[in-house]
Amino acid sequence: MEEKKLDVKSIIGFVLIFVILIGWFYLNQPTPEELEAQKAQQEQVVAPVTEERPDTTTTVLEQPQVDLKDSLAVANYQKSVGDFSYTPVREGVTVLENDLVYLEINNKGGQITEARMKEFVTYDSIPVYLVREGNADFGLSFTTTDNRVLQTNTLFFEPQLSQNGDNQVLSMKAKVSENQFLEYRYEMKPGDYLVDFTIRSQGLNGIINAAQPVNMKWQLRGIRHNKSVQYENRYTRLTYNHEDGKISKLSEGSDDEETEEKVKWLSYRQHFFSSILATDTPFESAALTSRNLVEEESKETLFTKEYSSETALSLTAGELAHNMYWYYGPTDVQVLDDYKELGLADSIPFGWGIFGWINRQVFTPFYGFLSSFLPFGIAIVVMTILVRVLMSPVTYKSYLSQAKMKVLKPEITELNEKYKDNAMKRQQETMKLYNKAGVSPMSGCVPALLQLPIFYALFMFFPTSFALRQKSFLWAEDLSSYDTILELPFTIPFYGDHVSLFPILASVAIFFYMMMTTGQNMQTQPGMPNMKVIMYISPLLMLFFFNNYASGLSLYYFVSNLITIFIMLAIKNLILDQDKIHAQIEEKKKQPKKENRFQRKMRQMMEQAEEQKKTGKR
């Protein structure tokens, strides 16, 4: 096992990846006090359920049913429901649908009260609903010239359905008279998830108080769609786009709120599906809120997060006129890229910086190409093989550095023993040895750092790739969710109530890889007594952390580590010659070595420190 060694910094780099990921996940979990506060808050929210449709519908906010004309005639609208002697009954819904999405727009509030995907089902084969049974509410709130406050989600709108070529057009009007009304206009195109949405008023410039803001509020509770609600919740997030193109997000792990300016669109993402409201004219200011509704992994949990956004709409000559868009559909880059002018594809969590660029521009299209003619699981295997082959020069550089360090190991051990009582001198002599031999102790760390963007980009690719959703491979029913070979009658903390096989295989592969690369370091590297612990804890972290993750990601790590082991064996046995490396190092030692500026500065600093130490002893 002597030759099986990896640079210590490479090992630390891999371990740090796991530690950072674990820390990121668990440090963002709410405290028990926050959980208790969330529970108390949720108990105050009444979520009414529609028993019969289309005769009755409900919204999140229960308010008196009023007609705009009647409400304008009653001076005490906000004081008491008892002030109304007549409540008109005009319940009903109007359907807009194409081959992709089914929408129901309710007369009460003129808002969408059902949004169903026609091509997709949840993990338990139920149609995917983004809006249903009162989980969403949308409306305006404005003050009249006689200082009354009206909320449109309590008003009744008169529907009128028509055609504009192949497009369906629905006009919803809350009328004061035939020439005075507030209108919501929906236009749905064939084969399109995007619905044009216009808010405008006519003849209300003497009724709406222009000195007070017209507030628009949109609320939604994300409906659970995935097998693991906690895993789904990690990728369920409120995302928004600034006018300058900057993408921002609220917290995915705890309650959060922000007030932002110049917002172009708001995305209520529910992992693989999104409800998005975009606008031609950026919202001047938006107050955004996200509440976490998931306390623990449970099959009884129905909702993931509760979102809310509130913004003010401007008036032009006392009237409303705003062009917007509703998107109810998959969080799929191939779909969202069709709306480049709105930039909706930026709502997908590809990752930040160079990592996100690699994910979006390299892995996403490349996997799409492979999966167009290969089974989805085989496409992952092929992509992994190609990635590892392309990265093999980096692996070679890393292993070459290890081999050189191994050749120098006896001399380093001798220096450690000779200067065991003088750390400064030991370090100084060690650096001289490295310089003479032409070896850099950092040369093994650099290749590992070069691979980090690839590792992180793939880490973000698999959980968010819509192409993997509900695609099976071997025993895995869904590559975007965890695979299950055994259901447990109990729950293991941090692990779950099931056993996934792909994480086990990946953990075993990582263990053997670390056995190959750290065996030498564990036995002889001074100052590293915990290397053996690290070798065991890394696969263990993999096993626990990925048990609830996408099986496609675990499949990638398994195949990747397996290929890396074979590549390293090939490099060791077929490419590198230890005797030749030793001879090269000895030849380097004989050659005069010119110090560069950094090495000279470091040597001088160490010599000064050594001299000061000697002076101090005198």
Image (tube, rainbow, N blue to C red):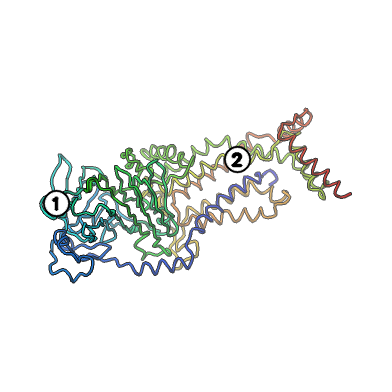
User: What label sits on residue 407 in the rendered view?
Assistant: none
Considering every residue shown, the one lying at the far right of the view is 618
Query: What residue appears at the point 19 percent right and 54 percent down from the top-left corner?
Result: 207
Q: Position of residue 239 (x, y in %)?
A: 39, 49
Q: Could you say which quadrant of the image residue 43 lies in?
A: bottom left
Instruction: Give me the C-alpha separation between circle 2 and circle 1.
Output: 77 Å
Residue occupying the point 58% across, 48% down: 14
Residue type of the residue flagged with mark 1: Gln
Viewer-nearest residue: 168 or 522: 168
Q: Residues within 10 Å of mark 2 (few under 14, many from 20)?
A: many
Residue 165's place in the image compared with 109, above or below, is above
Q: In the rendering, at what x and y percent does residue 38 appear?
A: 41, 66
Tally of marks: 2
- Regarding residue 198, the answer to whether it shows in the image is no
Q: Residue furthest top?
A: 591
For residue 617, side relative to residue 3 (left or right): right
**Nearer the N terminus, badge 2 or badge 1?**
1
> In the image, is residue 24 above or below residue 245?
below
Query: What secondary structure is marked by label 2?
Result: helix
Left or right: 104, with 516 as reference point: left
Q: Secondary structure at mark 1?
A: strand
Task: Return the residue found at the far left.
Answer: 178
Q: Nearer the viewer, residue 414 or 287?
A: 287
Q: Position of residue 368 (x, y in %)?
A: 38, 39
Would you call the spot at circle 1 few (<14 residues within 10 Å), some (14-19), or many (20 or more)?
A: some
Compared with residue 352, is residue 498 higher up or lower down, i.e. above or below? below
Locate residue 474 relative to residue 75 in the image: left or right: right
Q: Which mark is residue 568?
A: 2
Where residue 180 is drawn, which disc sits there?
1
**Which percent across, then down, holds residue 406?**
71, 41
Q: Amino acid at mark 2?
A: Met
